[in-house]
Amino acid sequence: MLYNILLVVQYISIILLLFMTGYIPRRCSKSLHGWLFLYCISTLLNNIGYLALMHVKTLGEAMLIWQVTYLGRVWIPYALLMFVIALCKENDKSIWTTILALFHVFIFFLVITMAHNHLYYRSFTFVEEGVFPHMERESGILHHVYDSLIVCYVIYGLAILLKTLKKTKNARSRKKLIFITFAVLTDVFFFVIQLFNPIPGYDITVLGYTLATVYFYIAIFAYDILETKTLAQNYVIEQVSEGIIAVNDDGSISFFNEKARAILPLLETEPQEALAKLDYLIENEGFLEYQEAEKDEKKKYTPKVNKLTDKNHSAGKVYILIDDTKHYMYAEKLTREMMFALSKSVEAKDEYTKGHSERVARYSREIARRLGKTEAEQEQIYEMGLLHDIGKIGVSKEIINKTSRLTDEEFNQIKEHTIIGFEILEQISAMPELAVGARWHHEKYNGTGYPDGLKGEEIPEAARIICVADCYDAMTSTRTYSIPKSQESVRAEFERCSGTQFDPKIAKIMLDMIDDDIDFTMNEKGSLKAIVGF
C-alpha cells in the first residue's frame, strides 16, 4: 500500500515539475528566474531518478541510476542558495560562488566513481527488505562535509531572507519574501526528517523539494501576475526604456510616459503636430534623436504604431518609440564599410590613386565643416566623396592607367564615369544624395564642365565642394600623367580658377585650408590633423 502511495506521489511530482520546467523559460527575464529554472530541472532529474530506483532489481542497476539521479540532486541546494541570493539582491559575483560550484562538480565526480573510491560512500549494499528493494549506503567523510555545507547554505539563505524582509517596507514584497522563506523552511523540515530515515530506501526530501518548487512558482509568478493596475502601469509604462504614447479614437492624446516626453517635447506644446511628425517618420522609416543629460551619445528611436481594440471595436492607437541605437550604429558601420569596399574596388583599377577617394571624402567633410554644415551634413558629404568616382568601374583599366595623352575618344570614355556612377548610385533609394556627387563633381562654375554643362548655383553645393576637394587631391598626389605640385603652385591654381572652375566661396575655404597647413601635411602621405585641430 505504501509503495503505491509513493509511486503516485512520485508521478504527480514529475508531472508538476515537467509543467514548471516548460513554463519558467518562457518568462525568464533575469537571473532570479534562471536559478529557479535550474532548481526545477535539477529536482525533476532527481525525482525521475528516484522513480526509477523504486523499480531496480540489482545492485548494478541501483548504482547506475543513483549516479544519474545525482546529476540533478547535487545541484538542488546550490540552485536554491543562488535563487535566494538573487532574490535578495546580494552579490552573486563572488569567487566563493564559483568555488562552491566547482565543489558540487567534484561531489558529482565522486558519485559517478563511487565504485572506485570511499570518499563519499564508504560502502553500499543491495537489500530486498523494506517497502521496495533498494541500495543502502554508508556515508564517507566528504558526504558529511557535503551535509555540513548544506546546513551552512540553509543558515546563510535564511539569514539574508530575514535581513531583506526586515528592511523591506512594501507589503506585497514582504508577502513574497515570507512565502519564499516558508518554502525554504519546508525544504529544511523534510531534510531533518530524512535524517531519521523514516522510509528505508526512499528519500523523503523528494517530497520537500517538490512542495518548495510549488511555493516558488506561486511566489514569483502568481504575485507578479496579480499586480494592481497602478503598479502594472508604473512598471510597464513608466519604467520601460521605450517611449509610450496612447491616443484616443478621436485622435486626442490620452497619455504619454516620461521617456516619450523627453524624446519628443513637442507632445506637451503641440500634441497634434507631434503626432503628425510621428506619422511622417513611420511612413518614411525615419527616427528621432535624443541625447540624455550628461551623456555624449545620441540615441535613435524608431516610432511604431499599433491599433488598440476593445471587443472588436476601435479604441485608438498606441505609439511606441523603440531604442534602435545599436541597430542604427550597426547599419551605419556596415554602410560605411560597404562604401569603403566600393571605393577600393575603383582604386584597384588605378595603382596611382590608392586612398584618393578617402582623401577627397575627408577634404570635402572639412570644407563642409568650415561652411557651417551640421554633423549629419558633413557625414553625408563625406559619404558622397567616398563614392564620387564609383563610375570608373565601367571604364577600361587601360585608359585609366594610360601614361600618355588621351585621345578624344578615350577622354569621352573617361567622362562617362560620371553618368555610370550616377546610374549605379541612384539605385540606392535610401541615400539618393550619393548620386549627386558622382554625376556633377566635374561640372565647372562657369558652365564649361561635364556631363551636363551646369554653372554657378545650378551645380549642387555638395558637388561643388567635392570638385574642389577632388582637384586639390589630384594636384597633390602622384598620377600616371603627373607628379605632385608644390603647395605654392596648388594655391596659385585655386586663385586662378576661382570663379571659373571653382565656386569662389568654396575656393576661398580651400585657400584657407592651404594657409593653415603650414607643414604641408595635407597630401597623399599626410593628414588633416594640422588644420582641424585634432
Image (cartoon, helix red, strand yellow):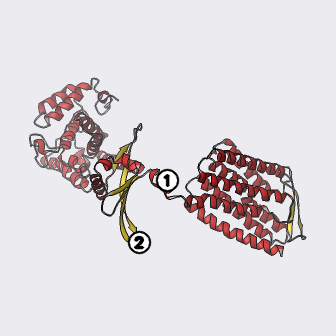
Query: In what element is the residue under mark 1?
Result: helix
Q: CA distance from mark 2 to mark 1?
A: 25 Å
Q: To which residue does mark 1 refer? A: 235
Instruction: Give the residue at the far top of this rendering.
Output: 518
- x 14%, y 29%: residue: 495
- x 73%, y 65%: residue: 47
Residue 66 vs residue 451, the one in the foreground: 66
In the rendered structure, which disc, 2 or 1, sits on the residue that comes first in sequence?
1
Q: Is residue 72 visible?
A: yes
Residue 166 relative to residue 486: left or right? right
The kind of residue tagged 2 is Lys
Against 131, is 404 above or below? above
Q: Quadrant of the C terminus?
A: top left
Against 440, is 475 above or below? above
The kind of residue tagged 1 is Tyr
Residue 420 relative to residue 329: left or right? left
Q: Is residue 113 visible?
A: no
Residue 192 vs residue 474, the one in the foreground: 192
Q: To which residue does mark 2 refer? A: 311
Residue 96, image x, y percentages = 69, 43
Tally of numbered tags: 2
Query: In what element is the residue under mark 2?
Result: loop
Q: Quadrant of residue 470?
A: top left
Q: Quadrant of the N terminus?
A: bottom right
Residue 467, image x, y percentages = 19, 40
